[in-house]
Amino acid sequence: MQDTSAAPEARPTQQSAVNRLLVAILRSPVHALASGSTAVLVYRGRRTALTRELPVRYAQADGGYVVLVGRPEQKRWWRNFTTPWPLTVVARGRAVAVEGTLVSGDSEEGLRLAGAYFARFPGRLRRARRQTRRDVLPSTDQEILATAAHDLRILRARRLR
């Protein structure tokens, strides 16, 4: 008879082969191939307590890191950061303990952080602009930023003190 009282084994996340390869590169001595704009977020899931590693594009702002969640309706990882939650950012070959918090794109802080991210990745702003509501036709750079940032999920990661 089998013992069913033991907790089930944790299954590995269903990361794509590309994500796993990118994480391996970013954690290796050849990290410079990709670490200029890509980092690894390492965090423990709030509900599952499983450690996850996720490659992300990042910008730096206010002495911390900014990550925009692409297609948030299709992803769940960002929900771990609706309130402050510890994680490690592995960027440029260094692991830094930080606290991540989700910031609304509608807030003043969200606009500032999105601005820093879009300054680093201008192509992302153009893509976000194409995906925004068609009834809003912004004319200034600030209006374009505000329109693009409206529905964004922005992860702000600050160093632990």
Image (cartoon, rainbow, N blue to C red):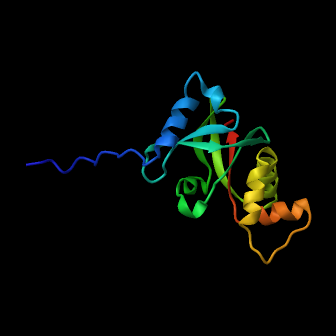
One can see residue 106 in this view: no
In the rendered image, the residue lying farthest to the left is 1
Instruction: Determine the image quadrant of residue 74.
Output: bottom right
Q: Nearer the viewer, residue 41 or 16?
A: 16
Q: Is residue 18 visible?
A: yes
Position of residue 29 relative to residue 72, above or below, is: above
Q: Residue furthest top?
A: 29
How many numbered marks does the figure carry?
Answer: 0
Give the percent coordinates (x, y) of residue 41. 58, 41
Residue in view at x 28 percent, y 48 percent: 8
Name the residue located 42 percent from the left edge and 49 percent from the top edge: 14
- The quadrant of the rendering that contains the C terminus is top right
Residue 154 locus on image (x, y percent): 69, 54
Q: Where 134 sits versus 115, above or below?
A: below
Q: Residue 38 vs residue 50: left or right?
A: right
Residue sitting at 58 percent across and 21 percent down?
A: 29
Q: Quadrant of residue 133?
A: bottom right
Where does the image place residue 77, in percent across and percent down from the top left?
Answer: 54, 53
Q: Nearer the viewer, residue 96 or 11?
A: 11
Q: Where in the figure is residue 106, as x and y percent of width and height?
A: 76, 64
Extreme residue toward the right, this view? 140
Q: Quadrant of residue 73?
A: bottom right
Left or right: 73, with 47 as reference point: right
